[in-house]
Image (cartoon, rainbow, N blue to C red):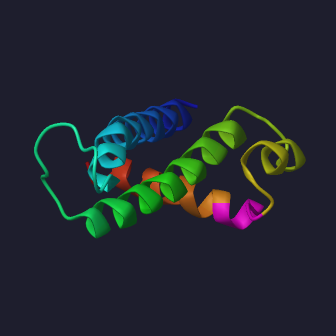
């Protein structure tokens, strides 16, 4: 039970970190009306934003699964491409990071 709470917390923290980067990446994707300094190329920002969006979707689906939602509800909310094995793989990744730390 304690391990499950730690996994939930690790996934939540990872999602918060990725979500905080999204507005910055959105601004860096702009080619004309950028606000502030350009810190990365436009293409890097586009790729990083897409990768973060995909990872956030995986993390949110894993959070829903850990909260006890069934797979059909998760598929409706987060996309049909989620399977139980892909969600379990994400959970196992964060379980390993907890074990190593």
Query: Magenta span covers which residues?
Result: 81-86
Q: Name, please, the residue furthest toward the right.
A: 72
**Quarter placement of the N terminus:** top right
Where residue 27 sits: x, y (%)? 30, 44
Where residue 62 sits: x, y (%)? 62, 46
Using residue 18 as the reference point, say whether residue 88 is left or right of it: right
Does 83 appear in magenta? yes
Depth order, front residue of 50/60: 50
Does 30 appear in magenta? no
Using residue 77 as the reference point, say whether residue 30 is left or right of it: left
Residue 20, by quadrant, is top left
Using residue 38 as the reference point, say whether residue 99 is left or right of it: right
What residue do we see at 25% from left, 48% from top?
Answer: 101
What residue do we see at 28% from left, 41% from top?
Answer: 24
Depth order, front residue of 16/13: 16
Residue 22, by quadrant, is top left
Where residue 8 sits: x, y (%)? 52, 35
Where residue 48 sits: x, y (%)? 35, 61
What residue do we see at 14% from left, 38% from top?
Answer: 36
Using residue 76 as the reference point, say whether residue 1 is left or right of it: left
């Amino acid at each position: 039970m304690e391990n499950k709470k730690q996994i939930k917390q690790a996934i939540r923290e990872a999602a918060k970190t990725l979500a905080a980067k999204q507005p910055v990446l959105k601004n860096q994707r702009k080619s004309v009306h950028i606000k502030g300094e350009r810190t990365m190329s436009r293409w890097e920002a586009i790729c990083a934003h897409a990768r973060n969006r995909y990872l956030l979707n995986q993390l949110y689906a894993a959070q829903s699964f850990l909260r006890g939602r069934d797979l059909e509800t998760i598929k409706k909310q987060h996309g049909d491409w989620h399977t139980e094995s892909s969600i379990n793989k994400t959970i196992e990744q964060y379980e390993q990071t907890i074990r190593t730390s």
